[in-house]
Amino acid sequence: MLRVMPATVVNEEGVLLGRVDESALQQHAGSSVVEVMQEGPQTVRVDEELPSLAKRMDKGSLDAVFVTDPEGRLLGV
């Protein structure tokens, strides 16, 4: 089965607003992004220590995290 990574939702300035996950894509095919996105996803900063990040990801069963700058602009996944 094809695994779909979450889609990121950003505004014109690149600030992370939310995410749309695989289940939303499958269950709400006719909906708009704003209707199905999960607001305020977990983020990390570029200077977070890897052991701390690994613990957070393991505890939350996360396979990806959003990396943002202090202004909330998305830098990577």
Image: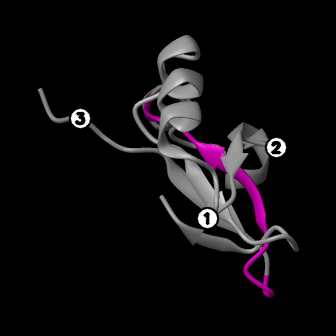
- Secondary-structure class at tag 1: loop
Q: Badge 3 is on which residue?
A: 3
Q: Nearer the viewer, residue 68 or 50?
A: 50
Q: Amino acid at mark 1?
A: Val
Q: Residue at x 65, y 70 (%)?
A: 74
Instruction: Give how far apart the Cα atoms at labels 3 and 2 are.
Output: 22 Å
Q: Which mark is residue 71?
A: none
Residue 32 makes an appearance in the image: no
77 w.r.t. 13: above or below: above
Q: Amino acid at mark 3?
A: Arg
Residue 55 x/y as whole percent? 53, 22
Q: In the image, is residue 3 part of the stretch drawn in magenta?
A: no
Res 1 → quadrant: top left
Q: Badge 1 is on which residue?
A: 46
Q: Badge 2 is on which residue?
A: 40
- Taking the image as shown, residue 60 lies to the left or right of residue 5, namely right
Which of the marked residues, 1 or 3, is nearer the chain's N terminus? 3
58 w.r.t. 31: above or below: above
Q: Nearer the viewer, mark 2 or mark 1?
A: 1
**Stretch of the chain drawn in magenta:** 12-22
Q: In the image, is residue 18 part of the stretch drawn in magenta?
A: yes
Q: Residue at x 59, y 53 (%)?
A: 66
- Secondary-structure class at tag 3: loop
Residue 33 x/y as whole percent? 68, 53
Q: Amino acid at mark 2?
A: Gly
Circles 1 and 3: CB atoms closer than 8 Å: no
Q: Nearer the viewer, residue 1 or 48?
A: 48
45 w.r.t. 54: above or below: below
Instruction: Give how far apart the Cα atoms at labels 2 and 1 are.
Output: 18 Å
Which of the marked residues, 2 or 1, is nearer the chain's N terminus? 2
Which of the marked residues, 3 or 2, is nearer the chain's N terminus? 3
Q: Residues within 10 Å of mark 1 (few under 14, many from 20)?
A: some
